[in-house]
Amino acid sequence: MLPHALRVLLIGARAGAMLAVRPQIITQRDQAAALVASSVPAQHRVPRPVLLPANQPDQPDTALQTWAGSFEPTVNALVSAQPVDEAHYAACGAQPARSVRVTIANLPRGIAPQDWDGELELTITHMPEPPAETDPIEVALLIGGERFAYSQVGVNGLYRPKSTPGANPNDTPPWRKRFSQLAPGAPFSVGIAITPKSAFTQTLDLTLYRAADQRRPLPLEAYLIHFEDPEYNRRLASQTAKSERLINLTATIDQKEVNLVHALTIAADRRSYNPTTQLALRYDWDVDQLNGLPWQATIQLERLGPAGELTPLGNPPGFSARLAVGTLRMLDLGQLRLGPGLALRPGDSPRITLRSLTITNSANNPLRYQALGAEVQLLVPIVAEPVTPTPEAAYALLRRDVVGPRDEIGCIRFAWAPEADRIDLVCADDLRREVVRRRAVFRWRDIVRPGRLQGYAIQKIAQNGATHFPLLS
């Protein structure tokens, strides 16, 4: 009796590849030799995943293909020969969505020559349009863990290293000494902190390289491919952790002291963390009238152990215990210490206590508000399971080259579920709601010979489809 159908499960086959299936029937009776029936091979092609639909400019929330940024949803990736990075802020309250793209224009290919004077010429692009007020930007040179601040010269995006007060102008600047110690081809970076009005600070990282010593450069050109996956961005959203308490206040209204009760909420961007993740923190009142006043509070960090023991946590380097109302504070849990060499581990729970709530400037407090015994606590657990999901997709970097009389397209980078180079929050006010949004930035690099490159594209392969023939740019 033969089966009505034969079902085959094929694992690990490459999409689009050809294969032959040749079923045969083998029979054997007692000790006799086995008999193999004749068969006819059948040629098959491994099916390709369905086509991911193109991104629609008016429907960014349903986009599935990679893009250069939310303001360029139909551009597959941002390709640049110059160092470039981009900060993005989603629509947040009354503030519309906006992006700030920064490019270093005066160092070709991001290579700093031996006699570099430290100048940086930045090209700053605002999307969708420049703001009415210029965004504050802080520029610093980062070499071997040392930070050298820059100052702006004029209004054309020119920045130079700050001089040390009281230093002899004939002495070699500290940044120059550190730069000259770098080996040829060694990388260093430029950190650019952007703080738009009514938003939080995002820091961009642009990598540079020291030129070789009196050597002719190799005939190679470096390119940066910068892209995001909007589908992965949506998976990065998390629920907020909140703790709320009613606070007794006193205020002077019509020359009379009045007792008031308002809710004070402290919030974090997740409900659980890994021992080395970043924690975003802020606190707010339940009414905007109080949030507009210069409230300041003290943050105390403690660790609640698995057995219920409470241990003080040492503040990380550069951490300020004072926090203003409505201000986003980033806390690196990997830098919190129980003691020498002792860090947080799964099963611990950092406890964040907000206390000593005061108004620092009485001139901005016409009603003379005072908080009586204000203290709010927030407990967040440390877990071993990763809280940041990995992409459920593979990405391939395709490159078109001119080879003789014809063009060739090849896959030069490929990765399943790669780790993003950076994950950013996009709206500080998300901590006042229930869901915190994020964006992941992938920054890949490639080196080609001059005159051969025709374009790059990112191909995405996922369970729900793939980009079959992306346009190379």
Image (cartoon, rainbow, N blue to C red):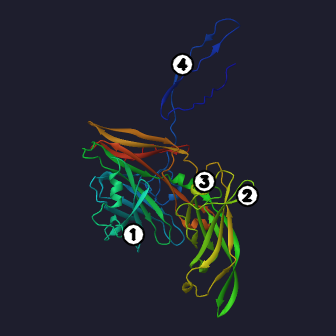
The residue under the point 54% across, 32% down is 12
Q: Nearer the viewer, mark 2 or mark 1?
A: 2
Residue 470 pos. (x, y %): 42, 46
Q: Secondary structure at mark 1?
A: loop
Q: Amino acid at mark 1?
A: Pro
Q: Secondary structure at mark 3?
A: loop
Mark sitting on residue 309: 2
Q: Amino acid at mark 4?
A: Val
Residue 400 pos. (x, y %): 35, 42
Residue 189 pos. (x, y %): 39, 55
**In which quadrant of the rendered image does the N terminus lie?**
top right
Q: Which residue is mark 3?
A: 340
Residue 293 pos. (x, y %): 57, 80
Q: Secondary structure at mark 2?
A: loop
Q: Which residue is mark 1?
A: 130
Task: Classify 392 as above or below 143.
Answer: above
Task: Classify 343 as above or below 244.
Answer: above
Could one spot residue 159 in this view of the protein? Answer: yes
